[in-house]
Amino acid sequence: MSEKVAQSGVRHVVARRVLTESGLGKRKVTISIGAPRRHPQVDWECPFLIDGIGDSRVQKAGGVDALQALLMAIEGVRVTLERTGRRLVWLDPEVGPDIPRYIPTVYGRHFEHRINLVIEREMKRAWEAKLKSRKADIATCEAELKQRKEAIAALEAELGKRKAAAAAWESNLKTSKKRPPAAARDHLAR
């Protein structure tokens, strides 16, 4: 654990992620999430620190238990990063920091079920789009392969003609000790 994180109040770091700001500079942004702990005024709290953008100060998220406090801290990180307006990337620029949105379950099972259906439908659409793109790439490669095979076949046919002309010329040289026929000379000169 870095001294800065320890001094900031995030003592027992349970998760850390380093993001890169996309664009001209490769600024590093480090997220540190501390272990949830009991708090005298709220049931539980979970400290988190985002270092590398603006004022690096410890923020805290509360919850009824340790898990909820941890989930709220992750949501706090996501919202804080989103509010900066910066393009922060973890592994894939298209995905960004890849910190999931918290989906509240306090609205009941029906609400949760509907949200999960939407997520599953959208995931399916994303995978179908990716599959369609890959199939298009395959079709492009197959078309290119077909063209190359046709070019190779034409080259092989031309090579066969040249070998036949060379064989005929060689045969003539052995039998007549004369110059090769004009057609063979022309063909070999190509």
Image: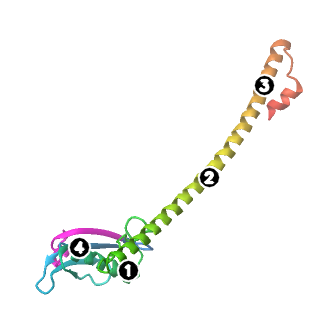
Mark 1 or 3, nearer chain start: 1
- Find residue 123 and report its horizontal and vertical position in percent: 45, 66
- In this orientation, which residue lies closer to the viewer: 143 or 135? 135
Residue at the spot of label 4 = 33
Magenta-colored span: 1-19
| Label located before the other in sequence (2 or 4) | 4
Q: Earlier in the sequence, mark 1 or mark 4?
A: 4
Mark found first going from the N terminus, 1 or 2: 1
In this picture, residue 15 sits left or right of residue 127: left
- Disc 3 or disc 4, which is closer to the eye? 4
Give the total number of marks visible in the rendering. 4
Mark 4 surroundings: few (<14), some (14-19) or many (≥20) residues within 10 A: many
Residue 89 falls in image quadrant: bottom left
Given this view, does label 2 or label 3 mark the residue nearer the observer? 2
Q: Which residue is mark 1?
A: 82
Q: Is residue 175 above or below residue 18?
A: above
Q: Secondary structure at mark 2?
A: helix
Q: Which mark is residue 164?
A: 3
Q: Amino acid at mark 2?
A: Ala
Label 3 and label 4: CA atoms lie apart by 77 Å
Q: Please identify the residue farthest to the left as the structure is shown.
A: 40
Across and down, in percent, residue 172 comes to: 83, 17
Q: CA distance from mark 1 to mark 3?
A: 72 Å
Classify the position of the C terminus by image quarter.
top right
**Kind of residue at disc 3:** Ala
* Residue 101 showing in the rendered view: no
* Residues packed near mark 3 inside 10 Å, few (<14), some (14 to 19) or many (20 plus): some
Q: Mark 2 — residue?
A: 139
